[in-house]
């Protein structure tokens, strides 16, 4: 009986430090915010250039594992802009609430949602990119859903001619 008591006492004493230990805490996410606005060249066309007047707000959240190493970056972008033909003044407006998720462990980047849509007065939407695209570190598309022309896949010159 005495041996069993010692065993139980020893087991109880061994468990006490575990019960009193503080729980492991993960590093909380860090958050950075940015705001940018201005005018910059967008594309050169035959006989005219297109500039973009823009305003963008960015919230970047970095998530960490239990050791404090970053594992994921989530970037939310809310932007508005106006593309302007520098000769005629013809313009279109666009906006896009963009979400980008960078998975540092997998080496992928995923863009989700409405990336951009541009409207021409009286014509409606003339450019649209939306859905979900995941690319690897080399830019290879791993998954794509929705209209994904990219900025390069749109004939901006003919839209603002």
Image (cartoon, grey):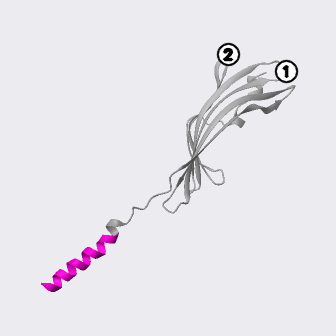
Which residue sits at x=53%, y=60%? 68
Q: Residue furthest bottom?
A: 3
- Give the side of residue 140 with respect to residue 83, left or right: left
- Specify start and end residues of the magenta stretch as a single range: 1-17
Label drawn at residue 87: 1
Do the CB atoms of the residues marked 2 and 1 lie less than 8 Å apart? no
**Does 84 appear above or below 34?**
above
Give the distance between the C-alpha atoms of the residues marked 2 and 1, in whole angstroms. 18 Å
Q: Nearer the viewer, residue 16 or 112?
A: 16
In the displayed structure, 6 sits above or below 141; it is below
Please tell me whether residue 9 belongs to the stretch shown in magenta: yes
Q: Who is closer to the viewer here, 4 or 160?
A: 4
Residue 4 place in picture, x, y as percent: 16, 82
Q: Quadrant of the C terminus?
A: top right
Residue of label 2: 121
Q: Is residue 128 visible?
A: no
> Is residue 99 part of the magenta span, yes or no?
no
As drawn, the residue found furthest toward the top would be 122
Quarter residue 98 falls in: top right
Magenta region, main secondary structure: helix
Residue 10 percent coordinates (x, y): 25, 79
Mark 2 or mark 1: whose residue is earlier in sequence:
1
Q: Is residue 145 left or right of residue 84?
A: left
* Residue 9 image point, x, y percent: 22, 78
Q: Residues within 10 Å of mark 1 (few under 14, many from 20)?
A: few
Left or right side of 38 for 68: left
In the foreground, 67 or 39: 67
Please state the horizontal and vertical placement of residue 99, each as a whole percent of the image.
57, 40
Q: Quadrant of the N terminus?
A: bottom left
* Callout 1: SS: loop
Q: Residue at x 66, y 16 (%)?
A: 123
């Amino acid at each position: 009986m005495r041996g069993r008591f010692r065993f139980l006492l020893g087991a109880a004493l061994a468990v006490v430090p575990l019960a009193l230990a503080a729980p492991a805490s993960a590093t909380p996410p860090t958050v950075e915010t940015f705001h940018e606005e201005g005018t910059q060249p967008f594309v050169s066309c035959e006989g005219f250039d297109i500039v973009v007047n823009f305003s963008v707000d960015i919230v970047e959240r970095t998530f960490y594992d239990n050791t404090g190493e970053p594992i994921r970056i989530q970037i939310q972008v809310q932007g508005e802009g106006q593309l302007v033909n520098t000769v005629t003044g013809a313009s279109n407006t666009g906006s896009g609430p963009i979400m980008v998720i960078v998975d540092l462990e997998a080496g992928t980047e995923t863009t989700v949602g409405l990336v951009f849509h541009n409207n021409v007065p009286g014509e409606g939407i003339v450019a649209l990119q939306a859905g979900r695209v995941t690319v690897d570190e080399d830019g290879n598309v791993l998954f794509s859903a929705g209209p994904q022309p990219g900025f390069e896949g749109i004939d901006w010159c003919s839209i603002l001619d």
